[in-house]
Amino acid sequence: MPEPLDAALTEVRALLLDPALTRAVAAGRRRGHRPSMVRAELRPVALKAGARLQISTSDGSRPYTRNVAPGPEADAAVDALLAEPFGNWHVETADATLQLRVTKSGEAQVHRAAASRPAAEPGGHDRAKEYLLDPGDPIFAEIGGSAAKRRQVDAFLRALAATLPDDLTGPLRVVDLGCGNAYLTFAAYRWLAQRGLDVELVGVDVREDQRRRNTELAERLGWADRVSFVAGTIADAVVEPAPDLVLALHACDTATDEALARAVRWRARWVLAAPCCHHDVAAQLRTRPTPAPYELLTRQGILRERFADVLTDALRAGLLRLHGYRAEVVEFVDSRHTPRNLLIRARRTGTAPTVAQRAEYRELIDQWAVTPRLAALLPPLPAPDAAPDAPVPDAPVPDDVAAAR
């Protein structure tokens, strides 16, 4: 049954300013009127400065996000949105859902319902929020991507959230190496910007057509001044200045080694790399005698391939540790979504390797008679008595890389 619009909007206002708000969206237009924006979304966020109401609006080409403090600032922002002639409001709180549609006669058609509760997991716990970045976020209408790809990207963002300090402030320069269609690039920028960080992000991919496509997407999203793209190899693409954070999602085989090596030479503060296929060490194992007593590990082809995966990532983590990083290998997404579900996560400490750490790495490669690709790409290790933060020299370019240039 139609209701007076003013009274219905007063109810909407109370819900938008209620601490129990979870999400609200305004869209559409009333008959004979046009809002100054095509869509507005509101949601609560927790920032270092405290609780804020995040308001994301779009004029159809350029999204704009701001975080307002509770009290007079939020009151004024909400009143301004309610004054816009939107045709529809959808508001969700922890307890209720309200849907408002403005009729042709200017009245409100309102539907109210109790909030649906998430299904409980075994043990009585509510199911955790499925996505860190809402799959209904407007950016996905532009960048696309399958449900599986979105899940991988969201899992990667969760690992990123666990890596960056909660009190991180100031400008943050990010590089996504081997960015491809830039699903991770755009999603990472969106999520980092929502945290209130001043972000500049560069995506690197070898294909020029990908650079053009991704640049056009950044322009449509209104982010071209903050998100840019470079065509070039991971090893050689020009990226200035050096980044604070390096990302690499499923760079194939030794491309992951190139991404890790560039991060070390840049002295990046954080590195997150999810390897893809592992061929280099596996090929070496096939041509080397297996040291005793490990013949059973490599006798079966499938076991040898899987062991090569483990050995490759263990050596990568070990090399990062020798070059002043604290590195760990974790599972970042369930194997149901991708078999390549390991993530190398590293934070630069500048700590010089100990004699024991050097010996541990050397004994492993000597025993298996392998030469990790990453070792050839990294700069020489500093002398044991060098200062922890001594400048890192450029690595000599391996002959096969130089020949490919």
Image (spheres, rainbow, N blue to C red):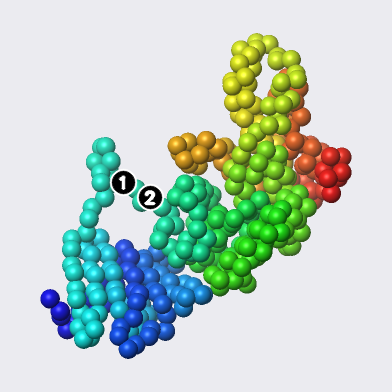
Residue 171, percent from left and from top: 61, 66
Q: Position of residue 402 (x, y in %)?
A: 86, 45
Q: Position of residue 45 (x, y in %)?
A: 40, 64
Q: Residue at (61%, 39%) from the top-left corner? A: 276
Q: The residue under label 2 is which amino acid type? A: Glu
Judging depth in this view, the residue of 305 and 95 nearest the camera is 305
Q: Amino acid at mark 1?
A: Arg
Q: Is 241 left, or right, of 87 in this rendering? A: right
Which residue position is annotated with label 1? 127
Residue 244 sits above or below residue 340 on the image? below
Residue sitting at 59 percent across and 20 percent down? 303
Q: Which residue is mark 2?
A: 130
Residue 254 image label: none
Residue at screen point 37% across, 85% down: 34
**Image quadrant occupied by the N terminus:** bottom left
| Real-space Cα separation, disc 1 to disc 2, in angstroms | 8 Å
Q: Are marks 1 and 2 in contact (CB under 8 Å)?
A: yes
| Direction bottom: furthest residue | 32
